[in-house]
Every structure is written in C-alpha cells, then in structure tokens.
Image: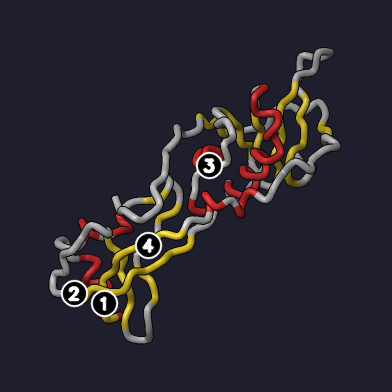
C-alpha cells in the first residue's frame, strides 16, 4: 500500500442486507427536529491533503511505465483509500508530461525522472461510511437494509442523538439513495413504523 501523510484507521464493514422486495409500511412520519445535522462534509478528517512522491513521465510513455512489472510494486495507486475510491494514479502536469504517483518510501527511479511532490485534496467521497462515522466519533451502524432507493436503518439507543447525521451520510455516500428512514417500534401493532430521517418522503 502507499504511504501518504494521512494514516487511516479501519473499522469493521457493515453487515448489509439487500432485500428483493420492499417491507410492508404501516405509516411514515417525519420528526419535527431535523436541525441537529451539521455540515459533516467539511470535517477536517474528511478533507485530508495527501502528499505523494512522483515519477515525471512523457505523456506518450505513461501506459508503458504503468505496465512495467519492475515499477508496479512502487506505485501508489495499487490499493484503495479507506476501502472506497481508488486514488487516480496519473495526475496532469503540463502539455507534454504527466505525474505518476508512487510510494513515498521509494527512491528507485528505473531510469525515470523523479517529479515534484504532488498534493492531493480528498473529500468525503473517498471514505467508506464506516470510516466516516468513526472520524465523526459516531458509533458504527452494524445493520441496514436497502430497498431500491430507500435505506432502512436499524438504529440502537446510542445512535439516537446522531440519527439525522447518520442518515445524511448514507444519503450522500451510497449511490442511488434518495430516502433514508429509521424503523421504530409501535406498541399498538406488530408492525414497525418508518421515521423519515433524510431525503424525500417516498418509500414506494
């Protein structure tokens, strides 16, 4: 793996259930107080700047360098960042050359010129949901269900103070999600209610 300045802390993956058909919905209601969601995307831990050593390569030779088996073990982009998005290995430099990111620990050059240190600004889209919650100091959500565009969260008591922020993370990070709800018990029924936490009020 590569060794940029930022070192991440991995958390367990979610236990995820994807249902083939939607659950029966007794009632959907919205909580009145949804103002506790802060702008979590701007958290410093989700916007690190990574610095990489580089190779400086003529544009026409980039692919041959990437395929060189001697070079490949030293490339930064051979692994994923935080289990989510792969760092783009080739970065623009000028009209004739491009930068190839490599491990900071690598001093070998294989006859390839060393380039300048390259800074890369990341954002929340590079992180997994489990890592985002960890960085925000929110207890991990172990189980959720996804039915089409709807995510159903099974939150515990210690999640309640963070439920809107958790829902907003799911809404923004998972692809094609438009609605996030929470299951709540109904003492007068054997069915659970769904509490709308984020997104559109559409569970159909």
Q: Are marks 2 and 4 in contact (CB under 8 Å)?
A: no
Q: What's the distance in space between the residues labelled 2 and 3, CA to CA?
A: 38 Å
- Vertical arrangement, residue 12 with respect to residue 102, above or below: above
- What is the quadrant of residue 189 in the picture? top right
At a point 84% along the width and 13% down the height, the residue shown is 188
Task: Answer whether labels 3 and 1 touch (C-beta < 8 Å).
Answer: no
Residue behind mark 2:
112
- Viewer-nearest residue: 112 or 16: 112
Seen as rendered, the residue at the extreme bottom is 95
Query: Percent x, y for residue 27?
Result: 83, 28
Q: CA distance from mark 3 to mark 1?
A: 36 Å
Q: Which of the marked residues, 2 or 3, is nearer the chain's N terminus?
A: 2
Looking at the rendered structure, the secondary structure element under dot 1 is: strand
Instruction: Tell me what residue is drawn at x 52 percent, y 49 percent.
Output: 45
Which of the two discs, 2 and 4, labels the residue nearer the N terminus? 4
Name the secondary structure under disc 2.
loop
**Crowding near the residue tagged with mark 1, few <14, some 14–19, many ≥20 C-alpha atoms within 10 Å:** many
Label 3 residue SS: helix
Label for residue 51?
4
Rounded to the nearest angstrom, the CA distance separating label 3 from label 4 is 20 Å
Residue 135's tag is 3
Label whose residue precedes the other's in the sequence (1 or 2): 1
- Disc nearer the start of the sequence (3/4): 4
Looking at this view, is 53 or 177 the one in front?
53
Horizontal and vertical percent position of residue 98: 33, 77
Disc 2 crowd, CA 10 A, few/some/many (<14, 14-19, 20+): few
On the picture, is 102 further left or further right than 28? left
The span from disc 1 to disc 4 (Cα, nearest Å) is 18 Å
Quick one: quadrant of the C terminus?
top right
Image side of residue 162 versus residue 97, left or right: right
């Amino acid at each position: 793996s590569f060794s940029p300045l930022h070192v991440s802390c991995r958390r367990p993956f979610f236990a995820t259930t994807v249902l083939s058909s939607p659950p029966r919905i007794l009632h959907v209601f919205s909580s009145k107080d949804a103002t506790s969601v802060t702008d979590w995307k701007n958290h410093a831990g989700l916007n690190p700047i990574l610095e990489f050593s580089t190779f400086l390569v003529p544009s026409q030779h980039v692919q041959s360098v990437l395929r060189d088996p001697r070079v490949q073990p030293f490339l930064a982009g051979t692994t994923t960042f935080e289990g989510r998005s792969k760092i783009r290995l080739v970065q623009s430099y000028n009209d004739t050359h491009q930068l190839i990111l490599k491990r900071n620990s690598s001093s070998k050059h294989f006859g390839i010129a060393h380039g300048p240190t390259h800074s890369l600004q990341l954002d929340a889209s590079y992180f997994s949901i489990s890592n985002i919650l960890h960085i925000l100091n929110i207890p991990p959500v172990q189980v959720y269900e996804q039915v089409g565009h709807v995510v159903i969260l099974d939150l515990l008591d210690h999640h309640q103070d963070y439920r809107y922020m958790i829902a907003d993370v799911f809404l923004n990070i998972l692809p094609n999600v438009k609605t996030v709800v929470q299951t709540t018990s109904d003492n007068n029924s054997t069915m659970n209610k769904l509490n709308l936490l984020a997104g559109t009020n559409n569970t159909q």
